[in-house]
Image: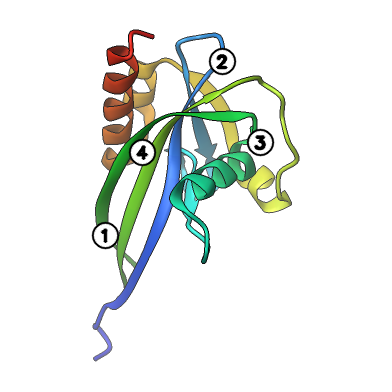
């Protein structure tokens, strides 16, 4: 029984966030885990996926003047973390900042995450996880199909 995995099942939402004036997207550097990520987090009870994605982007990146461009869908991501077997349903959105106005962030998020703006290709090169690279590929396809 000591080697038995503990299942953890939850839903998360996040976004591929477009710069308001340049063809760049937002990435988060998380030095404590040596990760480069997209903004994403748990969907709270009684919260819909889009609201969670907007909230998580504001908390982790410090930008809250967001507009929805497209719903990118959802996918199941499964992985092992220590003794836990994680099954996370991720729902992502393509979002665009209306302005670079920054908002106050929770202290823990401000300490953990540093926001940077990069090209689409740089994002694909530097993101830590393949699942997040897939979200960037989907977002890029949608964005360029829209003629933007």
**For numbered disc 1, what is the local secondary structure?**
strand
Earlier along the polypeptide chain: callout 3 or callout 2? 2
For the point 28% across and 88% down, the residue is: 2
Q: Is residue 37 visible?
A: no
Q: Residues within 10 Å of mark 1 (few under 14, many from 20)?
A: few
Earlier along the polypeptide chain: callout 1 or callout 4? 1
- Between 130 and 99, the one nearer to me in the picture: 99
Residue 15 spot, x, y in % from top left = 44, 37
Q: Residues within 10 Å of mark 4 (few under 14, many from 20)?
A: some
Q: Residue furthest bottom?
A: 1
Q: Which residue is mark 4?
A: 128
Distance from disc 1 to disc 4, alpha carbons, whole Å, reads 14 Å
Residue 9 spot, x, y in % from top left = 34, 69
For the point 53% across and 47% down, the residue is: 51
Q: Quadrant of residue 81?
A: bottom left
Mark 3 vs mark 2: give the one in front: 2
For the point 51% across and 66% down, the residue is: 45
- Between 7 and 54, the one nearer to me in the picture: 54
Q: Which residue is mark 3?
A: 62
Earlier along the polypeptide chain: callout 2 or callout 1? 2
**For numbered disc 2, what is the local secondary structure?**
loop
Mark 4 vs mark 3: give the one in front: 3
């Amino acid at each position: 029984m000591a080697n038995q995995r503990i299942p953890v099942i939850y839903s998360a939402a996040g976004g591929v966030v477009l710069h308001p004036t340049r063809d760049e997207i937002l990435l988060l550097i998380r030095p404590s885990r040596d990760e480069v990520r997209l903004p994403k987090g748990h969907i709270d009870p009684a919260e819909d996926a889009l609201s969670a994605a907007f909230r998580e982007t504001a908390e982790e990146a410090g930008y809250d003047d967001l507009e929805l461009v497209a719903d990118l869908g959802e996918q199941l991501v499964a992985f092992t973390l220590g003794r836990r077997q994680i099954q996370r349903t991720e729902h992502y959105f393509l979002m665009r900042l209306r302005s670079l106005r920054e908002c106050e962030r929770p202290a823990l998020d401000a300490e953990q995450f540093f926001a940077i703006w990069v090209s689409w290709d740089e994002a694909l090169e530097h993101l830590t996880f393949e699942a997040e690279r897939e979200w960037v590929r989907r977002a890029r396809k949608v964005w360029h199909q829209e003629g933007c």
